[in-house]
Image: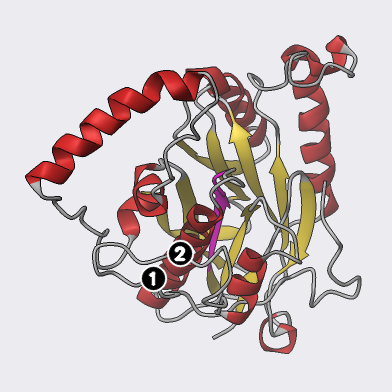
Amino acid sequence: MPSALVTAFSLFFLCNLGCTPQAMTSSLRLRVVSYNLLSSHLATTTQYPTLNPEHLDAKNRLPLVLNKLEKEIQSNQNVILCLQEVSYDWAGSLHTFLANRGYHLVTGSYGKKFNGYMGVCLAWPQDSFVVEDVDISRIADKREGGWPVNEEPPLLQKVWSKLQTALDKPLRKLGLVSGEDIDHWDMSERRFNVLVSATLKEKASGQSFCIGTYHMPCAFYAPMVMTIHTDLAARHVQRLAESHGSIPYILAGDFNFKPSDPCYRLLTTGEIDSTDPYHPSPKGGVEWKPSSINMASAYAVSDHGEPDFTN
């Protein structure tokens, strides 16, 4: 099954469709631009104290972002945009900008007030593609087989746990006791990150394909969470492609990992070593296993090769 994986640690990158170029690019040509805009609510002097405050001002940044997108749109007839960290404040402006250039924009917002209710966006030129399907999904809702259920502890253990929590609380504030262990399964289930995807047919070739964009949870302190969501995002796009007759697919986004990281190896090999700290430990009798099949990095199969990172 032809497929493609596009990875980015943060900002701007390009790709050409296909992990098996000879199977696809002979008939289908397109350009994918994935860009983390940095939410208008997160570009603050507190976060970036060494930068010129005028360069962080949203009203100054937005025209520069639109100018970058304009250059990409003009560079090729079949340019698909995959955007991350799009705030409410910018979503309307992006829609207006793109609509006036013949683009259709789909958004999936899931953030909170502090980050401008940010989310991801997918946009494509209507003159070039027919829309066959659009999917907007909270990835945590798409785990096949559901999530592990918390085992009910004995009554005495519950009482002791509550007592211990109450006793430890003042000690934690003093830094004398470390915080509670992270339940990576529970944390993964509670994440609201949305994946936006579309099944499109190129008018010129009649070739259908699926493309999705995702912003991986920035949870470096909880690597098992990143593994679970990496697998969920890939599997969801693959399942959508299967539902349309096993058509080619692309996954693009800001994945918050580098080519040397375990999550990259999971996507490109379909495997992760069981002894790796990124491998999720079992819970409630449920053993984690990869559900997605391996994909190819569009960078790696390009003439330029895989960069160390993108930023």
- Is 119 inside the magenta-drawn segment? no
Q: Is residue 136 visible?
A: no
In the rendered image, the residue lying farthest to the bottom is 22
- Quick one: 140 or 90, which is closer to the camera? 140
Q: Position of residue 293 (x, y in %)?
A: 51, 79
Label of residue 183 in the image: none
Q: Is residue 243 above or below residue 122?
A: below
Q: Is residue 286 left or right of residue 203?
A: left
Residue beneath disc 2? 280
Label of residue 288 in the image: 1
Q: Is residue 67 left or right of residue 123?
A: right
- Quick one: 94 or 9, which is closer to the camera? 9
Q: Position of residue 101 (x, y in %)?
A: 68, 38
Name the dominant secondary structure of the magenta segment.
Answer: strand
Q: Position of residue 172 (x, y in %)?
A: 47, 25
Instruction: Mark 1 and mark 2 in contact? Answer it, CB < 8 Å.
Output: yes
Q: Amino acid at mark 2?
A: Pro
Q: Residues within 10 Å of mark 2 (few under 14, many from 20)?
A: many
Q: Amino acid at mark 1?
A: Trp
Instruction: Find residue 211 and report its image quarter.
Output: bottom right
- Which residue does the image show at 55% across and 74% down from the upper left? 275
Report how far apart the C-alphas of labels 1 and 2 lie in the structure: 6 Å
Q: Is residue 102 visible?
A: yes
Residue range (magenta):
210-217
**Figure quadrant of the N terminus:** bottom right
Please tell me whether mark 2 sits on a helix, a strand or a loop: loop
Q: Is residue 128 left or right of residue 161?
A: right
